Amino acid sequence: MTETKNKPDITLKELILSIKNWICYLISKWYVLILAVILGSVAGILYAKIKKPVYTATTSFVLEGAEPGNGLGQYAGIASMMGVDIGGGNGGIFQGDNLIELYKSRTMIEAALLKPSQSDSSKVLLDHYFDMEQLKEEWKKKRPELLMVDFALKHQNSAIMQRRRDSVISKVVDDINAKKLAVGKPDKKLSIIKIDVSGTNEIFAKEFNEALVAEVNEFYIKTKTKKSLDNISILQHKTDSVRAAMNGAISSAAVAIDNTPNLNPTKQVLRVVPAQRSQFSAETNKTILAQLLQNLELSKLALMKEAPLIQIIDNPVYPVRESKMGLIKGAVIGAFLLCFMTVIVLTVLNTIRISMKD
């Protein structure tokens, strides 16, 4: 039976001695550390010179919802009898996080990427992205079939081309969401939303930022006002129908009188009944028409009072804000990283050397 001996725990004195020996060992390799600092500094300076500056275009706007209490409640009953809702209460569709996610959606980003470039009408913004990322040069070497895809067309001629296009667009959207697009509120207590678009191409950063904001704004207006426009269309149709019926009743009363000239007094029923029936129909339609006209004007007023979602505060302008690593910063970072890696390597080598001796 063999006896197993547990190794005693390391004491504080042994720990201090180990640290001291480690520091002495590193000091003995001072020339290696100095060389690492010099090489790291040079590498950092070269990296700072080679690295392209990053341009960040920023748009900020105030998020405004629909006005609470539009004062149309007293007429809602009559309008609902006509199958119309004049409340227009869809102000919460794009509130808060919903709006932020809308800016990050594939539909909005793709639509913005396919907008023509303001600086070069022969290109869409997606072409600027390809140039910025040098994707076409990469495709020439690895995937030349992608060069045959017309990305400006949403619907390709073949299923294979459509699949290739959608695949590339999906990767572009993912890259933009992950690295180039930042949407959020600077302060949660405020209603201000800030959109940052970053890229090594100044034109792309500015124009894509503007295109995305415009696309979301247009989508908002169409969605926000759709219900009110539908209400107006329904009310206008009903108003025209009732007006036509009222005019027809008035005409019928006049025709009934004209069709019975020099009527025998004992046969007045032939004139009075049709005339009164047409007059009653005209009066009824007149009352309905008055209410419909009132609701129609209220619906138009509700449409006019739809507050804009985006009230722009700041727009991106040239020159776009530029961030570039300075030479001193590059030198410091490079020296620190290479020196740190050198310390780790020396420590590992020293540990292996001591273990081999034991």
Image (spheres, rainbow, N blue to C red):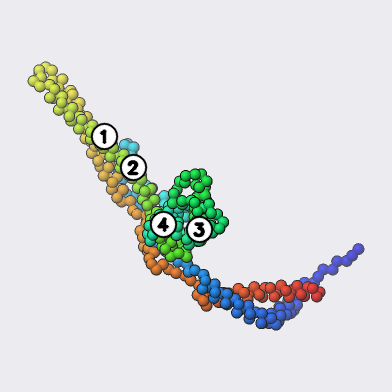
Q: Nearer the viewer, mark 1 or mark 4?
A: 4
Numbered badge on residue 123: 4
The Cα atoms of the two marked residues, 1 and 4, are separated by 50 Å
* Among the two numbered marks 1 and 4 on one chain, the one whose residue lies closer to the N terminus: 4
Determine the residue located farthest toward the right in the rendered image: 1
* Among the two numbered marks 1 and 3 on one chain, the one whose residue lies closer to the N terminus: 3
The amino acid type, in three-letter code, at marker 1 is Ser
Numbered badge on residue 264: none
Quarter of the rendering containing residue 261: top left
Disc 4 + disc 3, Cβ < 8 Å: no
The Cα atoms of the two marked residues, 4 and 2, are separated by 37 Å
Label 2's element? helix
Q: Which residue is mark 2?
A: 230
Label 4's element? loop
Q: Nearer the viewer, mark 2 or mark 3?
A: 3
Q: Which residue is mark 1?
A: 241
The Cα atoms of the two marked residues, 1 and 3, are separated by 60 Å
Q: Percent x, y for residue 91?
A: 38, 50
